[in-house]
Image (cartoon, helix red, strand yellow):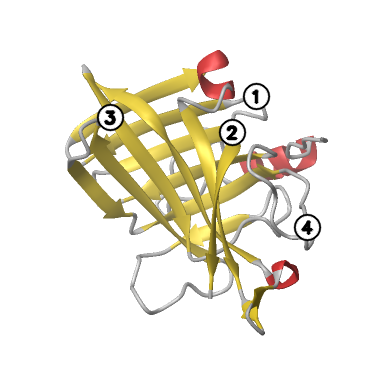
């Protein structure tokens, strides 16, 4: 399997456009950078009144048990049989376990309203407010963060109001039908600057193995 990362030219153009890497702008563009193809999760900022400072890498990031990706596919049923050739990758979730203070939690970072599988590395999407029954326009997507206790108690489910997501990589070899990538094959990586309010903002970089698929018939 060949894994790719953004070209140096893309990285240079991205930094130049926003004056300096790692800064912030009024329109919440992705001014930082993806941390690369080595498995990791980095989440820093303030959300729901809590300071978030999460860094996971090494074996904890690579083995698919601490952090992982779930790819969601929609597959039509034609004449009573599933037609994998018409499958559509519709949603991507980054999930796993992280500590906030001394509390271990389960999290989900949901990238919704746009399938990332067909995008090229370096593709940039604008994060917009989530409005049910109104799909994001071309070039837009939703980003949602969820916290749950290890006992299953919901702590937070909040969609970002604005921001930017840049795809780092989406790898894996499709199986039967040429669209659905088998579970355990491939990685997804990317970088997001997401804002929930004037004060609440997260910078997120990740590369995680895709160990789970959600294939839904329609």
Q: Which residue is mark 4?
A: 176
Q: CA distance from mark 1 to mark 3?
A: 23 Å
Earlier sequence position, callout 1 versus callout 2? 1
Q: Are circles 3 and 4 on residues that touch, CB within 8 Å?
A: no
| Residue closer to the observer: 199 or 37 | 37
Residue reaching furthest right?
2
State which mark lies toward you, 1 or 4.
4
| Residue closer to the observer: 156 or 193 | 156
| Vertical arrangement, residue 103 with respect to residue 134, above or below | above
Q: Are circles 2 and 4 on residues that touch, CB within 8 Å?
A: no
The residue shown at (49%, 66%) is 113
| Vertical arrangement, residue 43 with respect to residue 24, above or below | above
Q: Which residue is mark 1?
A: 38
Q: Which residue is mark 3?
A: 105
State which mark lies toward you, 3 or 2.
3
For the residue carrying disc 2, how many other residues have a C-alpha within 10 Å: few (<14), some (14-19), or many (20+)? Answer: many
Residue at disc 1, secondary structure: loop
- Position of residue 57 in the picture relative to residue 197 (left or right): right
The quadrant holding residue 191 is top right
Residue at disc 3, secondary structure: strand
- Position of residue 128 in the picture relative to residue 117 (left or right): left
Q: CA distance from mark 1 to mark 2?
A: 7 Å
Q: CA distance from mark 2 to mark 4?
A: 25 Å
């Amino acid at each position: 399997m060949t894994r790719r990362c953004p070209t140096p030219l893309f990285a240079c153009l991205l930094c130049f456009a926003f004056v300096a890497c790692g800064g912030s702008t009024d329109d919440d563009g992705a001014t930082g950078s993806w941390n690369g193809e080595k498995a990791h999760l980095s989440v820093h900022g303030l959300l729901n009144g809590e300071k978030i400072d999460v860094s996971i890498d090494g074996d904890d990031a690579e083995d698919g048990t601490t952090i992982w990706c779930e790819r969601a596919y929609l597959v039509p049923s034609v004449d009573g049989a599933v037609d994998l050739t018409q499958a559509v990758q519709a949603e991507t979730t980054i999930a796993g376990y992280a500590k906030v203070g001394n509390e271990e939690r389960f999290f989900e970072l949901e990238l919704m309203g746009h399938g990332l599988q067909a995008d090229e590395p370096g593709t940039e999407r604008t994060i917009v407010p989530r409005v049910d029954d109104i799909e994001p326009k071309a070039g837009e997507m939703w980003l949602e963060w969820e916290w749950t206790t290890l006992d299953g108690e919901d702590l937070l489910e909040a969609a970002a109001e604005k921001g930017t997501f840049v795809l780092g990589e989406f790898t894996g070899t499709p199986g039967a039908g040429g669209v659905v990538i088998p579970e355990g094959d491939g990685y997804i990586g990317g970088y997001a600057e997401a804002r929930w309010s004037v004060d609440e903002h997260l910078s997120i970089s990740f590369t995680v193995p895709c160990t789970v698929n959600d294939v839904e018939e329609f």
